[in-house]
Amino acid sequence: MVEEIEVVYENGVFKPLKKPQLKDKEKVIIIVKEKVITKDFIKRLEKLSKTLPKVQNPSKLLEEDRR
């Protein structure tokens, strides 16, 4: 079984932000990776999206680009 769970590392303990589907005292392996999408990243992306021109018909644009 593979389940991705966000956790907070606090006082030397990993604390899940949602209840994992594990049995009590079940041993698992945790892989730590950097969280790439942060609140700051989302804010910057939203700001950038406001500066880009709006595309009226993206499907048509993609279809033309494929030709």
Image (tube, rainbow, N blue to C red):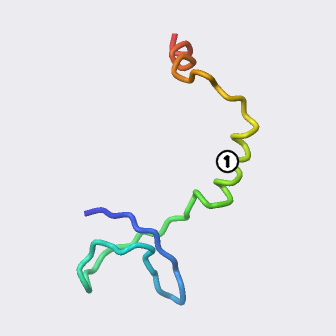
For residue 50, side relative to residue 32 (left or right): right
Quarter where residue 52 is shown: top right
Tally the numbered discs.
1
For residue 53, side relative to residue 15 (left or right): right
Q: Is residue 21 above or below residue 39?
A: below
Q: Residue at x 66, y 55 (%)?
A: 41
Coordinates of residue 50 in the picture (x, y in percent): 73, 40
For residue 52, side relative to residue 34 (left or right): right
Q: Residue at x 54, y 89 (%)?
A: 11
Single out the residue that lies furthest toward the right.
51
Nearest the eye: 52 or 65: 52
For residue 26, side relative to residue 18 (left or right): left
Single out the residue that lies furthest toward the top.
67
Coordinates of residue 40 in the picture (x, y in percent): 68, 59
Coordinates of residue 67 in the picture (x, y in percent): 52, 10
> Which quadrant is home to the N terminus?
bottom left
Q: How busy is the neighbourhood of tag 1: few (under 14 within 10 Å), some, or many (20 plus)?
A: few
Coordinates of residue 16 in the picture (x, y in percent): 43, 76
Q: Is residue 48 above or below residue 9?
A: above
Single out the residue that lies furthest toward the bottom.
11
Q: Residue at x 69, y 40 (%)?
A: 49
Quarter where residue 29 is shown: bottom left
Quarter where residue 55 is shown: top right
Nearest the eye: 18 or 30: 18
Nearest the eye: 40 or 12: 40
Q: Which residue is mark 1?
A: 45
Say what secondary structure mark 1 lies in. helix
Three-letter amino acid code of the residue under disc 1: Leu
